[in-house]
Amino acid sequence: MKYKDFEGNIEDLINIKLNEIEKKHNVKILHAVESGSRAWGFASPDSDYDVRFIYVHPQEFYLKLEDTKDIIDWELDETLDINGWDLNKTLRLFHKSNTTLFEWANSPVVYHTTKNWADIYSVSQKYFSVKSSMYHYYGTAKSNFYEFLQDEYVKYKKYFYVIRPLLACKWIEEKACPPPVLFDTLVQTMVDDKMKVLIYKLLEIKKNKNEADKGKRIIEINQYIEDRIAYYKDFISEYKDDRNADWHELNQVFMKNI
């Protein structure tokens, strides 16, 4: 069933789909959230819904000799993008301080969650790495900036795919913990008043434009971005390796939940 054919609201349809996934794949969904621009708080009128979830199979699934699939792709259309990761994959990636997982864990839009997930995330936070996470956000900002924001006319939505990761870097630098997912929280706490005016003006324009719409490149914001990219390149290269190499607590939480 496509969203356009559904008579209820999108949240109801998403929960119907999550229930279908559990039954079809014989899994338990531990946590399901919105990711991407709708979670960040700057969706365009035609933005789709990026639903992400963590699931676990019954214990016998993990005792097979053959290779097993660790992701579920359910429905992809112009409105819904639903994708899930197995708990085994999830914990392995938390061990690497995977930034995507920390974003899912802190999404402000939660469709479904469990006490099991709260316990899992409580342990997983001990594996957050400042250096690894900042390197991810820095790399995202740098690649998007030089690929999408150099022409005279640019897609305004791309500014937020650069500014947000740079503000996430600043949050991590100052607080040494996962940054908030909401863009507004980052702007309110990590940006000076002059830059706030420019960013909020840009945000209002973006919210009323479609994904593909373009506008004239904003010189002041581009200069701010260049300065921040240069700063974090040096900061990250000099920062110590702070990854947690131990597996014990993640192994324990895995065994407890299968």
Image (cartoon, rainbow, N blue to C red):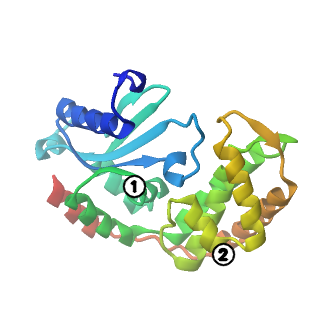
Question: First in sequence: mark 1 or mark 2?
Answer: 1
Quadrant location of the N terminus in the rendered image: top left
At which x and y percent is residue 239?
61, 75
At which x and y percent is residue 222?
81, 56
Residue 138: tell me if it is visible: no
Q: Residues within 10 Å of mark 1 (few under 14, many from 20)?
A: some
On the image, numbered disc 2 is attached to which residue?
Answer: 238
Residue 8: tell me if it is visible: yes
In 3D space, how far apart are the residues under numbered discs 1 and 2 (Cα atoms)? 24 Å
On the image, numbered disc 1 is attached to which residue?
Answer: 93
Residue situated furthest front in the rendering: 7
Q: Residues within 10 Å of mark 2 (few under 14, many from 20)?
A: few
Of the residues shown, which amino acid type is indicated by label 2? Glu
Left or right, 143 with respect to 118, comes to: right
Q: Please, is residue 133 above or below residue 49 in the view?
A: below
Which residue is at a point 40% across and 52% down the rendered structure image? Answer: 109
Of the residues shown, which amino acid type is indicated by label 1? Leu
Residue 169 occupies which quadrant of the picture? bottom right
Q: Nearer the viewer, residue 178 or 206?
A: 206
Q: Please, is residue 159 above or below residue 248 in the view?
A: above
Which residue is at a point 75% across and 64% down the rendered structure image? Answer: 197
At which x and y percent is residue 76?
43, 27
Residue 215 occupies which quadrant of the picture? top right
